[in-house]
Image (spheres, helix red, strand yellow):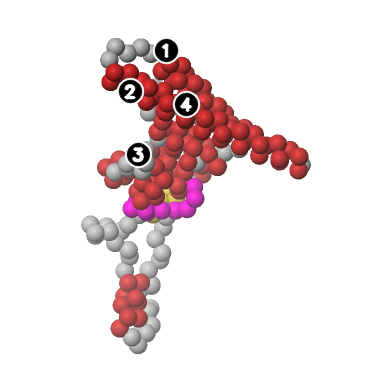
């Protein structure tokens, strides 16, 4: 799911690794904390498959053609910064990534794909929902209805579950109430999609 989130953010604009981590935490921090230890291997995998590519850094000033003096200390400092590449603290040139053509197709496929066995469904749905705007309405409805079916099943299991002690019973009740609330929320998203569809149909 990390690859999906990376592709979704790069679809909007090229980003450096640091900026990507910041945006990922801003977008998904409530459900998933992303570390550099997971981010950079994911970037390397996507780059190897051709889904993303490194943005070429701005060309340096040609040798022998100095940047004109500005006549001020601040101006000279700015000119000096233009003469050297942007560096990370490690001394390496900072890479910026952008979405390649293959990444566009992969992003679309991952948004539509069923979650792998053992996937945290709450997290998977949250990530897909964050980028649902890039899909057409029928596909968005399909994702929402799939999530609704998951929640309905979860709610049914909770209502049928039995507990022999108050702590287990409290946990089941909490999960049941959460599933009910989430189901109402998804129903509201589905209703909004269908209302937009009706409005669009009347105007065409």
Camera-nearest residue between 126 and 98:
126
Residue 176 counted in the magenta span = no
Labels 4 and 1: the sequence-earlier one: 1
Q: Is residue 121 among the parts visible in the rendering?
A: yes
Q: Marks 2 and 1, how far apart in space?
A: 14 Å
In this rendering, the label closer to the viewer, 3 or 1 = 1
Q: Secondary structure at mark 3?
A: loop
Image coords of residue 167 (percent x, y): 28, 20
Residue 141: image quadrant is top right
Which residue is rendered at x = 37% and y = 25% of the image? 174
Camera-nearest residue between 131 and 162:
162
Q: Which mark is residue 32?
A: 3
Image coords of residue 114 (percent x, y): 47, 26
Characterize the local packing of mark 4: few (<14), some (14-19) or many (20 or more) Cα atoms within 10 angstroms.
Answer: some
Labels 3 and 1: the sequence-earlier one: 3
Residue behind mark 1: 160
Characterize the local packing of mark 3: few (<14), some (14-19) or many (20 or more) Cα atoms within 10 angstroms.
Answer: some
Q: Marks 4 and 2, how far apart in space?
A: 14 Å
Q: Marks 3 and 1, how far apart in space?
A: 30 Å
Q: Which mark is residue 180?
A: 4
Q: Which residues are magenta?
A: 11-19
Q: Which mark is residue 95?
A: none
Q: Secondary structure at mark 1?
A: helix
Which residue is rendered at x = 32% and y = 13% of the image? 163
């Amino acid at each position: 799911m990390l690859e999906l989130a990376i592709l979704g953010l790069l679809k909007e604009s090229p980003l450096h690794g640091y900026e990507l981590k910041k945006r990922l935490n801003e977008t998904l921090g409530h459900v998933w904390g992303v570390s550099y230890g997971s981010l950079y291997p994911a970037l390397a995998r996507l780059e190897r498959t051709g889904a993303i590519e490194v943005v070429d850094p701005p060309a340096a000033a040609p040798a022998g053609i100095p940047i004109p003096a500005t006549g001020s200390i601040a101006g000279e400092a700015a000119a000096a910064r233009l003469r050297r590449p942007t560096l990370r603290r490690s001394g390496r040139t900072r890479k910026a990534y952008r979405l390649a053509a293959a990444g566009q197709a992969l992003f679309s496929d991952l948004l539509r794909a069923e979650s792998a066995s053992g996937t945290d469904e709450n997290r998977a749905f949250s990530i897909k929902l964050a980028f649902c705007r890039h899909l057409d309405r029928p596909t968005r409805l399909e994702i929402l209805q799939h999530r609704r079916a998951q929640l309905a099943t979860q709610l049914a299991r909770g209502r049928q579950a039995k507990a022999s002690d108050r702590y287990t019973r409290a946990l089941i009740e909490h999960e049941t109430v959460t599933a009910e609330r989430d189901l109402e929320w998804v129903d509201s998203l589905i209703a909004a999609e269908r209302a937009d569809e009706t409005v669009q149909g009347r105007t065409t």
